[in-house]
Image: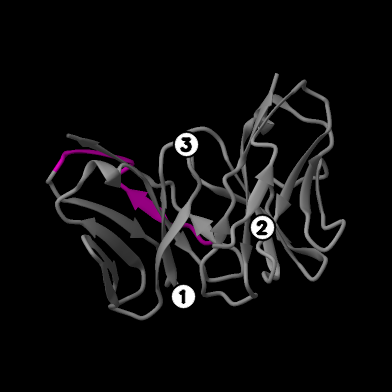
């Protein structure tokens, strides 16, 4: 089945630093979704990218979908302690979502 | 705001016992899922359910697992004879339709601990 590889597995930053997580696939993705899971919480939808080269922004979060639709990234500018959690990409080319392993972000105040 | 609700929030059971996890999806949603997450690991697909039947299932979803929609609102996951490795957080999710685009709405999860 479709596999999405996500790096890094862990990222620790100082508050105010930027953060980026990457999602890669060996095959073309029909769409990519990003979710955030707070510690002890459940996955919460952030965004969906469908078009090649698409860029979407949500306040300090910037999401990109590669031109070849084989990779995606989530960039957070000037992290805050409220950004802590695990960020998952998920490939949605079929009726189910296939999640990457996630990047766990910790922020030092 | 409508949400997916799950019960129980935490269940402790002995190995070999049957467990039923319950979910109430968002009322106008048509597509239902169970995912599981072993502590610290990724969210793994178990099964999807549409129009009162399983639409797709993963290799994890073996004969020990079953799903049911006994009435118009509840969606249940049954594990017939639990094993230690079934210990995980089980998330129910729903989606308005079968489209391959569109977010999944997750419940808060049921933590299963098998002793």
User: Disc 2 versus disc 3: distance between alpha carbons?
Assistant: 20 Å
- Say which element carries label 1: loop
- Span highlighted in magenta in the image: A1-15
The residue beneath circle 1 is A30
Say whether mark 3 and mark 2 are on the same chain: no
Task: Judge if badges 1 and 3 mark residues of a common chain.
Answer: yes
| Picture residue at 23% right of the left edge, 64% below the top | A59
Task: Name the chain letter of the residue that bears numbered label 3.
Answer: A
Gap between marks 1 and 3 measured at Cα = 30 Å
Q: Is residue A14 magenta?
A: yes
**Does residue B33 belong to the magenta stretch?**
no
Name which quarter of the figure residue A55 lies in.
Answer: bottom left
Residue at horizontal 48%, vertical 51%?
A: A43
| Number of other residues with Cα within 10 Å of mark 1, as a class: few under 14, some 14 to 19, many 20 or more | some
Host chain of mark 1: A
CB atoms of marks 2 and 1 within 8 Å: no
Residue marked by disc 3: A40
């Amino acid at each position: 089945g479709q596999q999405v590889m996500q790096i890094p597995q862990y990222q620790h930053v100082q508050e105010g630093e930027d953060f980026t997580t990457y999602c890669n696939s060996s095959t073309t993705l029909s769409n990519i979704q990003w979710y955030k899971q707070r510690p002890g919480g459940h996955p919460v939808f952030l965004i969906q990218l469908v078009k090649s080269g698409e860029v979407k922004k949500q306040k300090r979060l910037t999401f990109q979908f590669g031109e070849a639709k084989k990779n995606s990234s989530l960039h957070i500018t000037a992290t805050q302690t409220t950004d802590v959690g695990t960020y998952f990409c998920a490939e949605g080319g079929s009726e189910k979502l296939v999640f990457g392993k996630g990047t766990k972000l910790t922020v030092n105040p | 705001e409508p949400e997916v609700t799950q019960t129980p929030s935490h269940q402790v059971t002995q190995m070999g016992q049957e467990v039923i996890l319950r979910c109430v999806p968002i009322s106008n949603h048509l597509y239902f899922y169970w995912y599981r997450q072993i502590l610290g690991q990724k969210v793994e697909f178990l099964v999807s359910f549409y129009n009162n039947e399983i639409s797709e299932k993963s290799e994890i979803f073996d004969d020990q697992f079953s799903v049911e929609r006994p009435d118009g609102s509840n969606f249940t996951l049954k594990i017939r004879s639990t094993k230690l490795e079934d210990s995980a957080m089980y998330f129910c999710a729903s989606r308005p339709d079968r489209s391959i685009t569109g977010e999944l709405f997750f419940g808060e999860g049921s933590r299963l601990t098998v002793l």
